[in-house]
């Protein structure tokens, strides 16, 4: 057992731990039930951040260490916890250095800790909506927009310290832990007692794939949309999301469509980060009406738009775009095929082979290539059945 990360040596992540100095004083209050969780990230975060403190408990009103941390006049305290009245820390961060208090535990445990401690409820409250999917693939979150403690600190410290790229190193030990954990599980899968069942005739790997991926190949068009999206701010209205990047690829012909639309509303601080486009790229974009006119010329009335989930399709419609009526949710189809935990687009595509080269600029171009990889793989399996 490693005495530093408290993990078995075979799955120790200490070699991936960075050391990141901060002007922010980080105080992590961990629920006792999380202390011995082998895949928790609070201890991982505390090992990366020398200016952090990790305390375990449930009642904090009489805590001397917490009182000392909250009493630092040079770094006034704030609480990272969502709820009514919480300010969006990505959009409206506090000025100057602060003491950042983070509650670590399940969402039910964290809710109880905040509710039962007036000293925490009295703190100015901040929250954020994650600009990217969680990489915590070995533990299920209640909602897709939730992230682990170390990922939350990565996003928030990047804003507070004004150096988002520097704090992305916090993901290194998380990835190391996730990868080694998944590899360990793959080598030694759990054995379950099962009653013997009658033998079934072998099935082709493509037996679950709908025949639309062979019968209507000429109509399949993969699409990805990126938005200028202001993070959620409880109790305060924010500008609605608007489409700024729309990319598509026709499977049968190999044609690729990619157009950037200039934002019509104020640019969110996180837009360039999650879209992987620069402000200059966005500023050179065409009017959104022109984007949709070009896509209308690219698409046809019988096209089936293939996207991962509903977000891209709904974003385009909400931004005023006319789209072909046909659509396929690849995420729903993949979930039905695997009949189990699916993971992210990137995780599922990795089960089909190495990541392909992006088809165009930005995150949309990278994700579009993954959608094309999935559809082509399904087409090949369905054709072979």
Image (cartoon, rainbow, N blue to C red):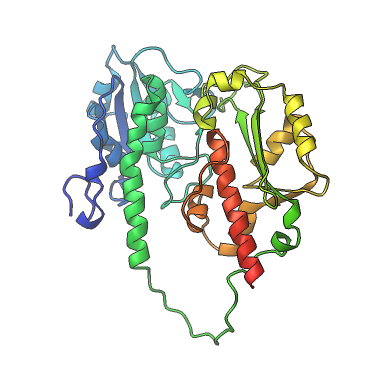
Q: Is residue 247 visible?
A: yes
| Identity of the residue drawn at 26% across and 54% down | 11
Q: Position of residue 369 (x, y in %)?
A: 57, 46
Is 383 located above or below residue 10 in the figure? below
Q: Is residue 70 left or right of residue 194?
A: left
Image quadrant holding the C terminus, namely bottom right
Image quadrant holding the N terminus, namely bottom left
| Identity of the residue drawn at 24% across and 22% down | 68
Q: Position of residue 238 (x, y in %)?
A: 62, 21
Q: Is residue 357 left or right of residue 324?
A: left
Q: Position of residue 144 (x, y in %)?
A: 53, 43
| Identity of the residue drawn at 57% across and 22% down | 281
| Identity of the residue drawn at 70% across and 38% down | 314
Q: Is residue 72 left or right of residue 249?
A: left
Comparing 152 with 199, the one in front is: 199
Q: Is residue 129 left or right of residue 247?
A: left
Comparing 7 with 83, the one in front is: 7
Answer with the quarter of the image where residue 49 lies: top left
Is 179 located above or below residue 311 in the figure? below
Q: Is residue 207 visible?
A: no
Comparing 257 with 277, the one in front is: 257
């Amino acid at each position: 057992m490693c005495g530093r990360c408290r993990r078995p040596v075979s799955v120790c992540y200490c070699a991936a731990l960075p050391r990141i100095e901060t002007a922010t004083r980080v105080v992590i209050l961990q629920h006792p039930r999380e202390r011995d969780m082998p895949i928790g990230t609070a201890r991982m975060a505390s090992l990366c951040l020398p200016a952090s403190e990790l305390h375990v408990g449930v009642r904090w009103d009489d805590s001397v260490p917490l009182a000392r941390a909250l009493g630092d006049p040079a770094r006034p305290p704030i609480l990272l916890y969502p709820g009514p009245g919480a300010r969006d820390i990505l959009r409206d961060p506090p000025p100057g250095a602060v003491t950042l208090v983070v509650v670590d535990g399940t969402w039910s445990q964290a809710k109880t800790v905040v509710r039962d401690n007036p000293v925490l409820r009295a703190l100015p409250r901040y929250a954020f909506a994650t600009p990217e999917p969680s990489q915590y693939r070995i533990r299920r979150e209640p909602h897709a927009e939730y992230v682990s403690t170390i990922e939350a600190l990565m996003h928030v410290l990047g804003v507070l310290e004004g150096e988002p790229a520097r704090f992305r190193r916090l993901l290194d030990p998380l990835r190391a832990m996730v990868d080694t954990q998944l590899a360990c599980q793959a080598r030694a899968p759990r054995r379950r007692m099962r009653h013997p069942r009658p033998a079934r005739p072998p099935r082709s790997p493509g037996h679950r794939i709908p025949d639309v991926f062979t019968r209507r190949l000429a109509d399949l068009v993969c699409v990805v949309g990126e938005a200028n999206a202001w993070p959620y701010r409880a109790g305060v209205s924010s500008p609605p999301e608007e489409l700024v990047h729309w990319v598509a690829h026709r499977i049968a012909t190999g044609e690729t469509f990619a157009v950037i639309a200039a934002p019509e509303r104020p640019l969110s601080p996180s837009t360039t980060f999650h879209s992987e486009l620069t402000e200059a790229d966005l500023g050179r974009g065409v009017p959104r009406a022109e984007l949709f006119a070009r896509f209308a010329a690219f698409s046809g009335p019988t096209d089936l738009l293939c996207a991962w989930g509903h977000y891209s399709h709904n974003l385009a419609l909400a931004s005023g775009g006319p789209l072909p009526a046909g659509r396929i949710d690849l995420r729903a189809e993949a979930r039905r095929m695997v009949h189990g935990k699916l993971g992210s687009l990137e995780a599922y595509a990795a089960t089909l082979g190495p990541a392909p080269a992006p088809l165009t600029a930005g995150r949309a171009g990278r994700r579009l290539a993954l959608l094309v990889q999935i559809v082509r793989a399904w087409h090949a399996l369905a054709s072979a059945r």
